[in-house]
Image (tube, rainbow, N blue to C red):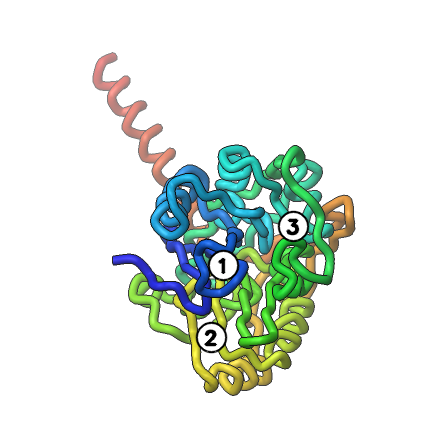
Amino acid sequence: MHDQPLHGILRVPILFVNAYLVDITPNQSDGGWFLVDTGLRSAGASLIRQAARRRYGPRSAPRGIVLTHGHFDHAGSAAILAEHWGVPLFAHALELPYLTGQSAYPPQDPTVGGALAMMSRAFPRGAMDVTNYVVPLSNGSVPFASEWQVLHTPGHTPGHLSLWREKDRVLLAGDALATMNQESWTTTITMPRELRWLPAPLTTDWDAATASLQRLAALRPHTVVAGHGLPMAGEQVADLMDTFARTFKRPSHGRYVRQPALADRRGVVEIPPPAADPVRSVMRVAAGSAAMAALVLAVSRRRRRA
């Protein structure tokens, strides 16, 4: 079963993350379209091309690809799709260091706790290089879709952006927030709709993230689509966003919770020291115990042979 378009926006789920096909003229699939985010490498490219063929026809290509940010789960297929369609990638100017090979993102922070944090121990973070395709965006509008306003919403990453369409109060939030609970193993699978933290282990400036969320809530959106979770729609969403922003609390502990990573137009400048990680300590002890057991076993076998 495939999602149905909502206000001319089609969600393409790619494992645990979303990409979006966006009609330039809502609900007119023959009026051109653009892509927001590209999901995971390879899997994202295949699923997005399939969805695009179903909705727009086998020869249709987007006017461009807008990246909310450059994390591996949002930009993983960016180069593949940009080359396949021969279209540019658009990202905020402050995100370019991470998309042009100049800088890696700060290390993820698994110490914030929860399901996603545990999974983040295996996430890649190396610099991506799509220099040949990427074009900088700043606050303003999407060049080929003037109804969509580009909003700089830093916090999750320095150059994170969201898209806002005023006429029907639709917010494409990216990872400025989530519409599912990613801290729970159960809800990561069942995905009930609720406004929740942005992906915590990859968020490196919680002051900026809080300010960005408050700015988005002040828009009073009626529809919110995010990088993680199902769309939320209805006039009640504005009040839910307002309450969420007013009562928002960052994690109680973590590497970046009290001190952000610092970045400029060149990329990461300074990161705080790692937070205490009891899970990693346990893993090290377990690995050391396993190594010691293997050594004892090897010595025992050698003695038997002697």
Please state the total of marks drawn on the protein image.
3
Assign a secondary structure to mark 3: strand
Amino acid carrying label 1: it is Asp
Residue 136: image location, x then y, percent = 71, 48
**Above or below, 55 relative to 306:** below
Q: Nearer the viewer, mark 2 or mark 3?
A: 3
Per the image, the residue denoted by label 1 is 23
Amino acid carrying label 2: it is Leu
Work out which quarter of the rendered image holds the C terminus and state it. top left
Q: Are marks 2 and 1 in contact (CB under 8 Å)?
A: no
**Above or below, 214 relative to 264:** below
Q: Which of the two residues, 191 or 12, is positioned nearer the viewer here?
A: 12
How many residues crowd mark 2 within 10 Å: few (<14), some (14–19), many (20+)?
A: many
Say which label, 2 or 3, has the lower sequence index: 3
Residue 172: image location, x then y, percent = 54, 65
Q: Which of the two residues, 44 or 32, is positioned nearer the viewer here?
A: 32
Q: Residue at x 72, y 62 (%)?
A: 140
Per the image, the residue denoted by label 2 is 195
Say which label, 3 or 1, has the lower sequence index: 1
Which residue, as the protein is rendered here, is positioned at the far top?
306
